[in-house]
Image (tube, rainbow, N blue to C red):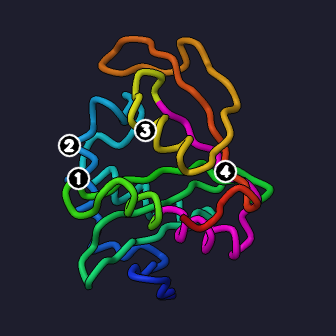
């Protein structure tokens, strides 16, 4: 386990498995905005997927602030050092600007470990996440019509990407 201390945040990689329950709880709060029908639907499915992703070359990072877990960033390795990125934070632990700062620090570590691109997929109606990705410096790459299902209904997704040169300190 590697711990990088950057400013007021500690970035722990890989994300310790005993933190997954907090992550699952946060994800459940945002389920309607973030999660499609093909994402893990139970805590056990999430834990199994996290283990599979790491075994397949994925990366995961716990974001700590004042000794407490406040968020996580993770990526599924899809090939050639490209990762499908995800993130979630405890709703009340940090202000929006602090979440942005912590995410940028985490992405800097992600890229320093060899990632060349992190692609982000968002449900098209998730305005808050899209704004966050833009503030993060992610590049809009396109929209996929009727790409996935949420509660059985087809929905559109938008694609963004982060590259090392675009992630600058806040």
Residue 48 disc label = none
Residue on which the image places disc 4: 162
Observer able to see residue 1: no
Number of marks in picture: 4
Which residue is rendered at x = 46% and y = 44% of the image? Answer: 132
Q: Secondary structure at mark 2?
A: helix
- Is residue 138 positioned above or below 36 on the image? below
Closer to us: 76 or 52: 76
Helix, strand or loop at mark 1: loop
Mark toward the start of the polypeptide (4 vs 1)? 1
Please state if 21 lies on the left or on the right of 79 as rendered.
left
C-beta proximity under 8 Å, tags 3 and 1: no
Q: Which residue is mark 1?
A: 91
Q: Earlier in the sequence, mark 3 or mark 4?
A: 3
Distance from the alpha carbon under mark 1 to that under mark 2: 9 Å
Looking at the image, tell me whether mark 3 or mark 1 is earlier in sequence order: 1
Q: Which residue is mark 3?
A: 129
Q: Mark 4 or 2 closer to N-term?
A: 2
Q: Is label 1 or label 2 in front?
A: 1
Q: Using the image as rendered, state which of residue 101 and residue 22 is in the foreground.
A: 101
Which of disc 3 and disc 2 is earlier in sequence?
Answer: 2
Q: Are marks 1 and 2 in contact (CB under 8 Å)?
A: yes
Q: Which region is colored magenta?
A: 103-122
């Amino acid at each position: 386990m590697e711990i990088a201390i950057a400013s007021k945040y500690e970035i722990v990689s890989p994300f310790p498995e005993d933190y997954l329950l907090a992550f699952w709880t946060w994800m459940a709060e945002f389920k309607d905005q973030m999660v499609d029908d093909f994402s893990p639907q139970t805590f056990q499915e999430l834990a199994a997927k996290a283990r599979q992703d790491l075994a397949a070359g994925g990366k995961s990072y716990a974001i700590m602030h004042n000794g407490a877990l406040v968020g996580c960033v993770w990526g599924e390795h899809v090939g050639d050092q490209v990762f499908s990125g995800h993130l979630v934070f405890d709703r009340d632990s940090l202000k929006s600007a602090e979440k942005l700062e912590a995410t940028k620090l985490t992405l800097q570590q992600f890229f320093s470990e060899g990632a060349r691109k992190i692609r982000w997929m968002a449900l098209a109606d998730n305005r808050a996440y899209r704004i966050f990705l833009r503030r993060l410096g992610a590049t809009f790459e396109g929209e996929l019509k009727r790409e996935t299902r949420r509660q059985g209904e087809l929905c559109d997704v938008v694609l963004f990407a982060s590259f090392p040169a675009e992630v600058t300190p806040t």
